[in-house]
Image (cartoon, helix red, strand yellow):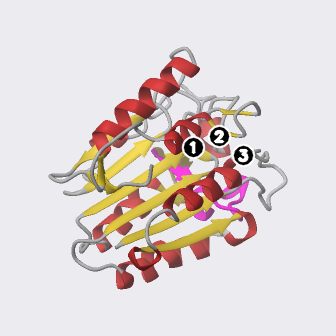
């Protein structure tokens, strides 16, 4: 059984957070891709814009999903949204990455966003049954202009001081066996979206898949190499997807 939770956010309640153009379309297209699996062998939850509140995302992934999965299942968690690096207001040296939900507040990213370092790891720990959990993120956490990211205000104020603490690299997170994260770009890059594609460039090539394959499953590393190469060429090396984690059997159901 393939369980897919797909989140896409273009519009934000906080007027200080800029809208995106194609994040919701990315999530819808991913849902259509997953729908190619036989209905009896898939379960799809799609959260878009106003439905993609922090509470709804946490309830879906943190509570409902662990009860729904069984040993041997595959889980696909997909986010297309803004990402933000931000400091703990009480401890400026504690910097983390946050996924930005529909109701995340610009001035309170620390308390209203979804932290990669803590919340995501907690979800993965609760999903102990599936043989593979694949997290795909079309967002970035550099805080740089021009993509699906912004810098949290606490961290931005911190940069006026003498030292800016670093963010723990995603590759250093202990995700556990059978847990993989494929991200749209490197830590100091920007996840771009293009009107000519109607999608984020990473998701555009993810939707195209690994090309011609045989069998009922697709190797994650094979998929990654194909997507990363295409994104690298399209952006002339300015955006290169990253794959982190480990799995003895890194294979997804064939969707392409």
Q: Label 3 neighbourhood size at 10 Å, few (<14), some (14-19), many (20+)? A: many
User: Secondary structure under badge 2?
Assistant: loop
The residue identified by callout 2 is: 148
- The answer, for residue 110, to whether it is visible in the render is yes
Q: Nearer the viewer, mark 3 or mark 2?
A: 3
Q: Is residue 139 left or right of residue 170?
A: right
What numbered label is drawn on residue 139? 1
Q: Pointers 2 and 1 in contact (CB under 8 A)?
A: yes
Q: Is residue 139 above or below residue 24?
A: above
- The answer, for residue 100, to whether it is visible in the render is no
Residue at position x 52%, y 65% from top?
35
Q: Is residue 149 above or below residue 234?
A: below
Q: CA distance from mark 3 to mark 2?
A: 10 Å
Where's residue 255, x and y in %?
A: 43, 54
Decide which of tag 2 and tag 1 comes sooner along the chain. Answer: 1
Where's residue 50, x and y in %?
A: 75, 69
Q: Pointers 3 and 1 in contact (CB under 8 A)?
A: no
What numbered label is drawn on residue 29? none
72 part of magenta stretch? no
Q: Label 2 neighbourhood size at 10 Å, few (<14), some (14-19), many (20+)? A: many
- Identify the magenta region: 94-113
Decide which of tag 3 and tag 1 comes sooner along the chain. Answer: 3
Q: CA distance from mark 2 to mark 1?
A: 5 Å
Decide which of tag 3 and tag 2 comes sooner along the chain. Answer: 3
Where's residue 79, x and y in %?
A: 55, 55
Q: Nearer the viewer, mark 3 or mark 1?
A: 3
Q: Quadrant of residue 121?
A: bottom left
Where's residue 85, x and y in %?
A: 55, 43
For this orientation, the residue located farthest to the right is 15
Q: Is residue 70 left or right of residue 191?
A: left
């Amino acid at each position: 059984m393939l369980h897919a939770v797909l989140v896409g956010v273009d519009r934000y309640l906080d007027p200080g957070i800029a809208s995106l153009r194609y994040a919701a379309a990315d999530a819808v297209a991913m849902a259509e891709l997953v729908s190619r699996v036989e209905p009896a062998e898939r379960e799809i939850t799609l959260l878009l814009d106003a439905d993609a509140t922090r509470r709804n995302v946490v309830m879906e992934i943190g509570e409902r999903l662990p009860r729904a999965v069984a040993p041997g299942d595959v889980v696909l968690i997909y986010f297309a949204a803004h990402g933000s690096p931000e400091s703990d207001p009480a401890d400026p040296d504690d910097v983390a990455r946050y996924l930005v939900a529909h109701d995340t507040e610009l001035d309170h990213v620390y308390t209203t966003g979804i932290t990669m370092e803590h919340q995501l790891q907690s979800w993965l720990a609760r999903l102990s049954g599936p043989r593979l959990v694949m997290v795909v993120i079309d967002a970035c956490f550099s805080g740089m202009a021009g993509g699906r990211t912004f810098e949290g205000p606490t961290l931005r104020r911190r940069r006026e001081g003498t030292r800016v603490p670093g963010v723990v690299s995603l590759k250093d997170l202990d995700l556990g066996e059978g847990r993989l994260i494929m991200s749209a770009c490197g830590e100091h890059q920007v996840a771009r979206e293009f009107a000519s594609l109607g999608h984020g460039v990473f998701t555009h090539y993810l939707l195209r898949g690994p090309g011609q394959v045989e069998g009922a499953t697709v190797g994650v590393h094979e998929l990654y190499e194909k997507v990363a190469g295409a994104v690298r060429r399209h952006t002339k090396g300015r955006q290169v997807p990253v794959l982190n984690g480990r799995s003895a059997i890194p294979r997804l159901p064939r969707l392409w």
